[in-house]
Amino acid sequence: MDQYVDGNVSLREVMSSYPTGVTVVAGSERADTPFGLTVNSFTSLSLSPPLILVCIGQTSTLHDRLIASDNFSVNILAGNQGAVADRFAAEPSGERFEGAAWQVGTLGVPIIDGATAWLECSRYELLKGGDHTILIGRVEHSAVTGRDALVYHRGSLRPSRG
């Protein structure tokens, strides 16, 4: 039988034991004013229609801008992009794209260079989920580069291989 360290740990601690991919969810009010944040609560929702969801904390400084956006991107970070994940999690929101390599996608949203994959989405639906907003997007454009993904597990970022 497994030995448990503590039978009453926080949900955050339990969830940190579950490896997840790391994304930067981004939008733009104009081509020259991108904004984005690191998000690891991302999943496929439906293949027909093609839907994904991301969960955005309601206390995030970018929450209101993201949920008001008609379009957004989900950039699935590559294994060598730990610094990008840290930057989009920690830097003041207005400075996150400074010096970052990115392009404007078909829907006018930022696509981060070097990501393992990206999706451009139109806002499909918003749902309340406790202290988060569940942003459901319809995938309009996407690409895969074949690079290894970045994984978050037990408080650390690491490549999915190696």
Image (cartoon, helix red, strand yellow):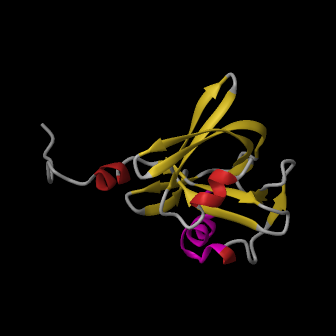
The answer to whether residue 9 shows anywhere in this view is yes
Residue 9, position as x, y percentages in the image: 21, 53
Q: Quadrant of residue 48?
A: top right
Residue drawn at the location 74% of the way across and 77% of the way down:
98
Q: Quadrant of residue 45?
A: top right
Residue drawn at the location 13% of the way across and 46% of the way down:
3
Residue 110, position as x, y percentages in the image: 77, 58
**Magenta residues (range):** 78-93
The C terminus lies in which quarter of the figure?
A: bottom right
Dominant SS type (magenta): helix
Residue 90 magenta-highlighted: yes
Q: Is residue 84 above or below residue 63?
A: below
Residue 34 magenta-highlighted: no
Residue closer to the observer: 33 or 146: 33
The N terminus lies in which quarter of the figure?
A: top left
Residue drawn at the location 63% of the way across and 72% of the way down:
93
Residue drawn at the location 76% of the way across and 47% of the way down:
145
Residue closer to the observer: 35 or 128: 128
Residue 158, position as x, y percentages in the image: 51, 60
Q: Is residue 15 left or right of residue 94?
A: left
In the displayed image of the protein, which residue is found farthest to the top?
48
Q: Is residue 148 left or right of residue 130?
A: right
The answer to whether residue 80 shows anywhere in this view is no
